[in-house]
Amino acid sequence: MIKQWIYGSPLPDFALAEPVDLEKSWDVFPASRISKEETGLQFLTELFPGDRIFGLGETMRGIDKRGGRYVSYNTDDANHRHDMPSLYASHNFFVVVPREGDPWGLFFDTPARTVFDMDSGGEAMLRVTVESFDLRLVYVTGGDPLSICRQFLQVIGQSFLPPLWAFGFGQSRWGYSSSEDVRRVVKRHQEEALPLDYVCLDIGYMDRYIDFSVDKKKIPDLKALVLEMKEQGIRLVPIIDAGVKVEPGNPVYDEGVARGYFCVNKQGEPFQAAVWPGMTHFPDFFQPEASRWFGDQYRVLTDQGIEGFWNDMNEPSIFYSEASGHAGLFKLGLSHIAPRLAERLAMNTRDDYRYFYHRIGGKTVCHHDVHNLYGALMTRASAQGLQEQVKGRYLLFSRSSYIGAHRYGGIWTGDNYSSWEMLRQNVKQMPGMNMCGFLYSGADTGGFGGNCTRQLLLRWLAFSVFTPLMRDHSATMTREQETYAFGDTEAFRRILSLRYYLLPFLYSEFMKAALRRDMLFRPLCFDFPKDPMAARVEDQLMLGESLMVTPIVREDTDSRQVYLPEDMTMVRFANGEFLLEERSRGMHRITVPEDEVVFFVRKGRGFITAAKAVSCTRDLDLRDVRLITGDYYDQYLDDGMSRQADLSNIRRVRREER
Ligand code: MIG
């Protein structure tokens, strides 16, 4: 059962794609738990020992959210720690699983700053504070935690469907800017026989960081480069930032100003904020016309054959603004003496967000009050452009997001760090993001900041082979992090080859989950809700209908404990072979050398792999598969490109008659 309450007058809906019954009575939990406080609405309920909480999307800490405090206020803070309250997104849906009684879910649909205190003080209280009097509250009950999530996923609508090539391996780095960079990366992969499907271009490819421009000195002929790469099965994925450089004479800028498409300051002039290009204006994605106009700009690149993008800095990230003014400049000056401190002071001071405005349906609305929707609206704007410009499916992933944006694109988890803690966070973030509809997601494999080690990259890749977005990305000034930058490449080749063996299965499981509006990654306790041991597992995940993923997430060890909630088949991928072993319910220690991957398949369930090793999705025949376990597997199959995708595209793969 799913219903909603409306308080005040919230904005027209973005998150919900299907109608939800409106409840008028205040007399019902949870409405009776809502109170009006000085600065907004507050929801309060008591928790009992053993009650657990799941969800909140990409937020940090555990799969079980209890004990933490999480703030939905989209933030660009490069200083990632496991206890950061805010990341780039606001995914305001969670499910409470009481130790006794029935689970329930709540979605706080509001673009305003919202604090989720999940009993951080140990007072057995769950407190949600919304900095607004306008709220749409969606309440879900009935069945186990998984069925609550499924009901929620039904109403927020179907997840974005990327093309098959977007499931290949992508190599990226802050620094890739020129034709030569791209050629070098592709050549090195070919020389070492390392699989690859796409290369990302970071901000350096633009002319002075101007959106929709290309630096001709670095890439003299983009169209020719795209073609040259496509002939080798490789695609280019350029970055687009939210801010448009203030530069009279640049048509995007001139047009935006002339038509009033940018956010404005108190005086009604386009608001100025410094980001990579220097002073910029932010497109006002709340205006349908401005949104459509911004989406149209992608044509400059899609006309040259580009089929995929990543959208960045769309919280929006601000280095300093005319509002923070001299203080901002001071902070920037500080960056020479104490860069970390300056970064923390200068980035996204909440003040900046109070000094610019949107035009929403004839009204002027302060950015601060609708902040959390900004990135999501940029995603929708680009998606609407790309739907017109790209034949078939496009690739799009964004840094900032809000529930609803999952219908238009995927997300990556932003500027993580090359540490084992961040690998563990990546594992824990997956089910939360899936509960909020973001199936096409993944982290910067190997870590963005800091210097990755060979061992960390291998173990991280061994987890990322299972995530829909699998991209190695790292920051400028860090050590090179390509798989060929760590000496002998044999181990990397083996792990990457597993991704391509898994692709027919992964693609099929992804498409089935998306089309059914289901989760792909789940905590163990969603599949085994009655098992008290499963409830405590935070470093294993269920994937699709049949897999359990058990990554090595600690340094200097080649073994780990694995909990099996039932008898399962252990699959060891070693040296191009899939070796099977039956294991019984309970705890097991598994040993996993650096160049191997071990995972589990539920007993009797079908699991397929590609029959042949390939190093690019172009060479992959989704029909040429081998059934590794079970008697049959229902495979979702299509051309990986067409937008017409439905569950009738399922064929049964049976065990070969011998
Ligand atoms: O202020 O474009 O998260 O992936 O490499 C940093 C440069 C801007 C942040 C993104 C990161 C990207 C970087 N960007």
Image (cartoon, helix red, strand yellow):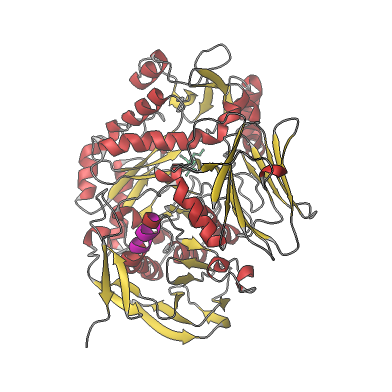
Residue 92's spot in the image, x, y percent? 58, 45
- Residue 36's place in the image compared with 53, above or below, is above
Residue 213 showing in the rendered view: no
Most common SS among magenta residues: helix
Residue 15 vs residue 576: left or right?
A: right
The residue shown at (67%, 46%) is: 28
- Residue 171's place in the image compared with 75, above or below, is below
The residue shown at (36%, 60%) is: 512
Residue 152 vs residue 97: left or right?
A: left
Using the image as rendered, state which of residue 27 and residue 171 is in the foreground: 27
Confirm whether the magenta stretch covers residue 65.
no
Confirm whether the magenta stretch covers residue 511.
yes
Using the image as rendered, state which of residue 325 and residue 52 is in the foreground: 52
Residue 129's spot in the image, x, y percent? 69, 40
Using the image as rendered, state which of residue 399 and residue 430 is in the foreground: 430
Residue 94's spot in the image, x, y percent? 60, 52
The residue shown at (28%, 32%) is: 299
Residue 460 showing in the rendered view: yes
Residue 334's spot in the image, x, y percent? 65, 31
Magenta residues, start to end? 507-514
Residue 607 lies in what quarter of the image? Answer: bottom left
